[in-house]
């Protein structure tokens, strides 16, 4: 079937992550089910734009957010673009589909003082787990890396002499990120503790049983420690990525440098952080200007 060819294309040629693949598959399978139930249509090659539009309306009526609906539309767009390139259809049904408008949400972040308070505190305790948990927070905040990038860092990816670390980003794209002397000390201390505990895992971060770290554990660690210094509703690893970018911009880093550090493909993805920076500038202006 065409959709299975598309899934293989995403996995082996585009090299999308497991989570991205699941999202695409879910969206297309949901659309396929909708066609069968609403129009008794099983052939995805015979879809017309009216069918897609009806699906979009039904999704909105179910209460899905504009962001969620737009993601599903994007999945279908990619799918039918692929089918057209393969010569399986002459025209895509997506050309007349207008995505619903969505309100822009600014990235939330932890205040600088709160992050410094957390990393300088004694709250983490002693021992391997304590050092590892502190390092999780420090790596996410100091490097601005994604959760998947964090858990896939290997011991061999760290250059202690040059204070640089290699991470594997989306679509297996590698990038080198510099890090501070403070983080270097933390990494060396953690490595020594790891060795003392006879943990030989090739991945930097591991469990007490020498297993590679998993995502749910990182979520729990981040949520627990951010709860002690922040009242944010969402306390995920990605919040620390937002925090990294916002703090860097607030301290004078240029947008292109932030883009490279974050591993963004396009500058537009990085520009969202300038809104937070502009809010800070407005606040400073109001406090400092005599006529503000």
Image (cartoon, rainbow, N blue to C red):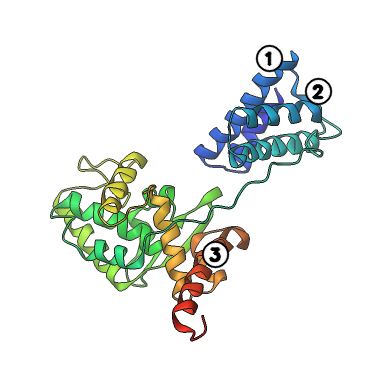
Question: Could you tell me how far apart the alpha carbons at marks 3 and 1 are, in whole angstroms?
Answer: 44 Å
Q: In the orientation shown, which residue stands out farthest toward the front?
A: 291
Residue 98: tell me if it is visible.
Answer: yes
Q: Dot 2, crowdedness within 10 Å: few (<14), some or many (≥20)?
A: few
Q: Residue at x 44, y 52 (%)?
A: 146
- For the residue pair 109 and 6, the one nearer the viewer reads as 109
Under circle 3, the secondary element is: helix
State which quarter of the image contains the N terminus: top right
Residue annotated with mark 3: 275
Q: In the image as oriented, which residue stretches furthest toward the right?
A: 90
Q: Label 2 belongs to which residue?
A: 46
- The Cα atoms of the two marked residues, 2 and 1, are separated by 15 Å
Q: Position of residue 81 (x, y in %)?
A: 76, 38
Question: Is 60 on the left-hand or right-hand side of 92?
Answer: left
Residue named by callout 1: 37
Give the residue displayed 64% in from the left and 28% down from the top: 61
- Report x, y in % for residue 254: 53, 74
Residue at the spot 16% in from the left edge and 48% down from the top edge: 198
- Badge 1 element: helix
Determine the secondary structure under disc 2.
helix
Mark toward the viewer: 2 or 3: 3
Q: CA distance from mark 2 to mark 3?
A: 44 Å
Using the image as rendered, state which of residue 291 and residue 259 is in the foreground. Answer: 291
Q: Earlier in the sequence, mark 2 or mark 1?
A: 1
């Amino acid at each position: 079937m065409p959709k299975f060819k598309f899934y293989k294309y995403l996995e082996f040629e585009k090299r999308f992550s497991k989570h991205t693949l699941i999202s695409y598959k879910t969206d297309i399978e949901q659309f396929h089910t909708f066609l069968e139930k609403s129009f008794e249509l099983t052939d995805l090659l015979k879809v017309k734009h009216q069918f897609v539009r009806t699906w979009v309306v039904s999704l909105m009526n179910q209460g899905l957010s504009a962001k969620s609906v737009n993601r599903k539309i994007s999945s279908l767009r990619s799918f039918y673009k692929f089918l057209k390139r393969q010569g399986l259809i002459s025209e895509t049904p997506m050309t007349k589909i207008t995505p619903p408008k969505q309100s822009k949400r600014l990235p939330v972040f932890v205040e600088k003082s709160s992050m410094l308070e957390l990393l300088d505190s004694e709250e983490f305790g002693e021992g391997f787990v304590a050092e590892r948990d502190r390092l999780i927070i420090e790596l996410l905040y100091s490097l601005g890396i994604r959760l998947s990038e964090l858990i896939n860092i290997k011991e061999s990816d760290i250059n202690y002499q040059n204070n640089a670390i290699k991470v594997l980003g989306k679509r297996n794209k590698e990038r080198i990120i510099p890090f501070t002397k403070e983080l270097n000390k933390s990494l060396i201390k953690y490595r020594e503790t790891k060795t003392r505990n006879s943990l030989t895992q090739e991945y930097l971060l591991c469990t007490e049983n020498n297993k590679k770290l998993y995502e749910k554990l990182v979520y729990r660690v981040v949520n627990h420690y951010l709860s002690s210094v922040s009242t944010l509703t969402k306390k995920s690893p990605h919040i620390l990525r937002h925090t990294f970018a916002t703090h860097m911009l607030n301290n004078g880093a240029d947008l292109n440098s932030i883009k490279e550090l974050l591993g963004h493909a396009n500058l537009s993805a990085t520009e969202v952080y300038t809104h937070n920076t502009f809010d800070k500038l407005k606040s400073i202006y109001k406090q400092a200007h005599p006529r503000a």
